[in-house]
Structures are given as structure tokens and as C-alpha cells.
Image (tube, rainbow, N blue to C red):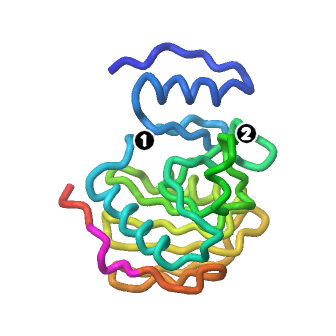
Amino acid sequence: MTVPAMHPRPGNLRVVAEQIEQATGLRVEILGGSLVMSPTPRGKHAGTIRRLRQQLESRMPPELAAYEVTSIALPDDEDDYCTPDLVVLPEEWDQDDAWLADPADAELAVEVISKSEKTRQIADKNGWYAVAGVRVLLVVDPRYGRWALHTAPKDGTYHGHFDGTYGDAIPLPSPFGFALDTGCLPLYGAR
């Protein structure tokens, strides 16, 4: 597959990202001014998202809803955005015409690590969420059967951190007040 040659002008990254998505079917995000591309989730990656979504939807407060394929803007820069695998927002989000969600509205963002993701990519993305001020970030890693819950963003860093392995419950803070079961999450096969 060939991606058309594009020469983004300053302030034009979002247009370029949308053109790449249309031409390739890849998911494109703009993190810290850089285009980041990844394939759309499938198989065990998508299954992990589905299982987490089912648990959230069955127990979270009725004024909240879980959304996939919803991007979050970096405050004051709509040309810098991230698309978590799953994000919990106020239920009225599905009545909004906006393309980008406000990070202040995100109660939880969930990132499921892909088989090919590198440590630096993961750290950069986690840092982006902290800078944006997303209250709670859950990172699930089916490569190793591990998870990390990041809370209390302040000054571009998460100050609360809990981690565990598949089988350990994930204790979600308010407004959730319940734990997610990780024993049901699939592991990726051998590389």
C-alpha cells in the first residue's frame, strides 16, 4: 500500500492525519506534534477492549458511557490529539457534533498495548494523557498479562500508580468505585 506524498503546513497536521486514515485504514493520532499510526484493533486486542467495555457498562454510573474510536484533544491544541481504545465520557457525548472530546470530560481512558508497540511509544502516550489532564489512564498489556492504572495527573505527570498482573482486580477510583476483573482478558500468542 502506498501512502500519498503529503507535505503538512504548520497547523495542518489534522488534515494530513485524516487523509492518511482514509488512504490506509490505519488509526492516526497526533501526539506532541508527531503523527503516530497504528493498525485498527483486531482479534485478542479487540477482545480485550470488548471485555473491559462490558464490565464498565454493566456497573458504571448511568450518566457515563464508554466510547470507542473517540479522540481526545490536548487542551488549547486541537492539532494534537490521542485516540484511546476506550474512553468513558458523559453520556451526552453521543449527542455532540464535536470531533474531539475535552480531556476534562474523560473519566477514564483505556489503552491496550499492541503486539508491536515499543516501550518508548507507550511512555510517550502515557505522558501525553498526563499532560492533557485525563483523570485516570488504564494501560493493559496482553503481551505480558500486566496492567497499570495511572491517576492524579498534575503538572504533566501521574502521581498515583497501581499495577498488577492478569488475575489481579483493577480498583477503579470514583466515580466508578468498583474493580475490573482481569482474569478474563486474553494474552497474545507467542511472537
Tag 1–tag 2 contact (CB < 8 Å): no
Q: Is mark 1 on a helix, strand or loop?
A: strand
Mainly helix, strand or loop, the magenta region? loop
Alpha-carbon distance for marks 1 and 2? Answer: 20 Å
Whether 153 is drawn above or below 123: the answer is below
Residue 80 percent across, percent down from the top left: 68, 41
Q: Where is residue 184 in the image (x, y as percent from the top left)?
A: 30, 76
Q: Image quadrant of residue 87?
A: bottom right
Region rendered in magenta: 181-186
Residue displayed at 31% across by 63% down: 143
Label 1 environment density (alpha carbons within 10 Å; few <14, some 14–19, many ≥20): some
Who is closer to the viewer here, 18 or 164? 18
Q: Which residue is denoted by mark 1 in the rendering? A: 38
Amino acid at the residue labelled 1: Ser
Q: Mark 2 points at which residue?
A: 78
Q: In which quarter of the image is the C terminus?
A: bottom left
